[in-house]
Amino acid sequence: QVHVVESGGGLVQAGGSLRLSCAASGRTFSDYAMGWFRQAPGKEREFVGTISFSGGATYYGDSVKGRFTISRDSAKVYLQMNNLKPEDTAVYYCAAARTGVARPGVLPNYYPYWGQGTQVTVSS
């Protein structure tokens, strides 16, 4: 079993920045691709981005390309969010999938392990 925990959410003004962190414990962290998703009230869960198990490849959803960056070290994965917009307001989730492929999946059901989510609110 893998336990995933996000942190770093909060309230920020439009144009500001925020960094989310995610830790996954219980198995070898470097075996897992890590994805970020978000869900706003009344909307479906949306793919934000993902990073391969090695950290060598990252992929992003169209709505965040050029503004968000995913990185990882030996213990955590990070989501750096710049130039935030009110439409980025959502609960952000971190998810893990044990895979050695270079390009992890972008659908929620690709990831069996999920955190509880952290709220990000961007005021206009």
Image (spheres, rainbow, N blue to C red):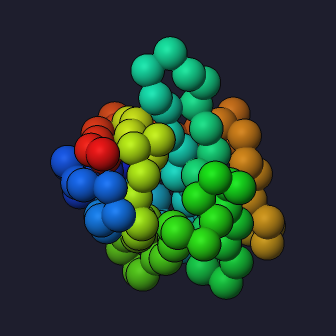
Seen at 30% across and 65% down, the residue is 16
Seen at 71% across and 55% down, the residue is 62
Task: Using the image, determine if residue 3 lies above or below residue 24.
Answer: above
| Residue 118 can be seen, yes or no | no
Task: Using the image, determine if residue 100 lies above or below residue 11.
Answer: below
Q: Residue furthest left?
A: 11
- Toward the viewer: 113 or 36? 36
Q: Quadrant of the N terminus?
A: top left
Is residue 106 found left or right of 78 in the rendered image? right
Seen at 46% across and 76% down, the residue is 72
Seen at 30% across and 45% down, the residue is 124
Task: Using the image, determine if residue 57 lies above or below residue 37.
Answer: below
Residue 104's spot in the image, x, y percent? 74, 59
Is residue 87 found left or right of 49 in the rendered image? left
Task: Using the image, determine if residue 89 lies above or below residue 71.
Answer: above
Residue 91's spot in the image, x, y percent? 38, 36
Residue 71's spot in the image, x, y percent? 49, 76
Q: Residue furthest top?
A: 42
Is residue 74 found left or right of 30 in the rendered image? left
- Toward the viewer: 112 or 117? 117
| Residue 29 can be seen, yes or no | yes
* Count of numbered marks: 0
Q: Residue furthest front?
A: 124
- Toward the viewer: 35 or 24? 35
